[in-house]
Amino acid sequence: MSLSAEEVHKIAWLARLAITPDQVDAYARDLSSILGFVEQMNAVDTADVMPMAHPQDLSQRLRPDLVSETDQRELFQSIAPKVEAGLYLVPKVIE
Amino acid sequence: MRSHAERGNDELAPLPVGRGVGVRAGFTTTLSIFPTIMHNKTLTELSAGLATGQYSSRELTAAFLARIQQHNPQLNAFITVTAETALAQAAAADQRRAQGQAGPLTGIPMAHKDIFCTQGVKTSCGSKMLDNFTAPYDATVVAKLNDAGMVMLGKLNMDEFAMGSSNESSHYGPVKNPWDLNAVPGGSSGGSAAAVAARLAPVATATDTGGSIRQPAAFCGVTGIKPTYGRVSRYGMIAYASSLDQGGVIAQSAEDCALLLNAMAGFDPRDSTCVDQPVPDYTAGLGDDIAGLRIGLPRQWFGEGLSNDVAQAVRAAVGQFEQLGATVVDIDLPHAPYCIPCYYVIAMSEASSNLARFDGARYGHRCENPKDLLDMYMRSRGEGFGAEVQRRILIGTYALSAGYYDAYYLKAQKIRRLIAQDFQQALQQCDVIMGPVAPSTAFDLGSHSGDPVQMYLEDIYTLPLNLAGLPGMSIPVGFGDNQRPVGLQMIAGYWQEGLLLKAAHRYQQNSDWHTKRAC
């Protein structure tokens, strides 16, 4: 398994991760090495095995649809990078 | 080995300086301030000392804060020390005691791994991404220990987002192993293990996704327990791989682990994977006989790759369990060789999903002058995450992407079931599985940092437990050729923490490895 620089760029874009040009080669090497390593899994016959998503095969617990939390907007926004009038500010999305 | 025994008996020995043991120049002890040597005491002893008024929580807290101030610059175990709030909490604990409302943990200092959210206190998870993050709420574990009246000394260093086996991926620099400053403390809970080993805190919280409690506990010669998945609430515990993460304890002994787990465990409606099952008193069965306990030794764990000194110490410990009345049977974990690729595909996939929340929008690091939303996401994440976290996000993203999901994530989930079934079959033949925690004792700082796969191989004996969701422990059972500690791993069936603690306590009543001190 060997990833090209172009593939690394594509994965990084999917992951919304800006990587610098000098990181690309190192990541291509490391990721190829990791993917090569995990190819060992192909040696296991898993034909009739049910995938195991979770240690406990439990169904999701439900609760009554009631308000259980108080409004803490100010507290939560006090640690935000940028807020205005109770709203989180991000760069303009719509022109 | 004799040098450790000597130091174990020397109540005043401070930290060794530089490599090797017994070098003590350049340090004075803080202990002269206090009539009683408090930092070497177990939780049970500290609890008794507080109850009988030998010292107050304020005195005890001040003693540990002084010890942190003295030794932390060298060890780097703490990211944040909360001296002021600790003394205030201690004063409140003393008051609570005066009112006759103290419990067994009231007034005892402790420290949290910096993965647990602590309201009003920086919670970094070892990452630049959260360097500016002050948690707006307490994790359930934090709230429970606050309710018990414990005093938080500070927040402990860790691998970034708990991704690492050496504590070298922390944004705040590596933690040093108190037994040998050239060695790693293990990871990801390296700060927790080092702090307890150096007695900068009597006990610490930790988390274990693939060995992050057991491996650092082994490397630092302390006792750690990773409970059954679902035993301890994950609410407010920053997520790495949600189907594997579980909070637990690093302490000086099994008895101390039991005391803290009593206060930490239990149902939490805020964690949908926390199981609604009564919590037994884990201290109740301690001291019970273990005659007839069936120990299983996995054949696959004692072969190639395990260093001789670790194998010897582990076998010697198993021999001692036999002397205490246990019987030994060889067992098989046939899918053991596949646990590393299986684990890393699952963990990295879940990590890539969990860490998508760090986008620079609502909290955490945001890049300077983003030109648009995409630029903000990409640069905030590129700047905020370190290399190992980025690697895992990238692999996880790849493994979950269209066309690759079946070959990686789904395949790993199927192997996961086979690994879990191996344990179920093995645990029909024995009560407790024992084996090494890691292939060797603590390795040198920097020795594995160039090759991620090499680092992943370190986790071969600890990962399968998390895949199955079983509880496990690491207890100190000796020293390797390089005088660094060796841990014994103990694994039991679901919800059998009490059995593990009982067996570990029985061993510790008949051995003194857990009383050896790095300083």
Image (cartoon, coloured by chain):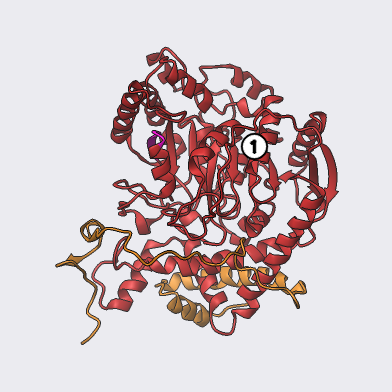
- Give the quarter of the figure containing the N terminus of chain B: top right
Where does the magenta region start and end? Answer: B148-154
Compared with B338, B30 (above or below) is above
Residue shown at the point (33%, 59%) measured from the top left: A68
Compared with A29, B187 (above or below) is above
**Residue farthest to the left, as pictured:** A85
Residue B480 in picture, x, y percent from top left: 70, 36
Residue of label 1: B501
> Which one is in front, B355 or B265?
B265
Visible residue check, residue B479? no
**Residue farthest to the bottom, as pictured:** A95
Indicate yes or no whether the magenta region holds residue B149.
yes
Chain A colour? orange
Indicate yes or no whether the magenta region holds residue B270.
no
Residue shown at the point (59%, 31%) measured from the top left: B255
Chain B colour? red
Helix, strand or loop status at disc 1: helix
Locate residue B357: give its quadrant: bottom left
Residue B99 in picture, x, y percent from top left: 33, 23
| In the image: residue B424, left or right of residue B124 | right
Compared with B406, B383 (above or below) is above
Mark 1: which amino acid? Leu
> Which one is in front, B481 or A54?
A54
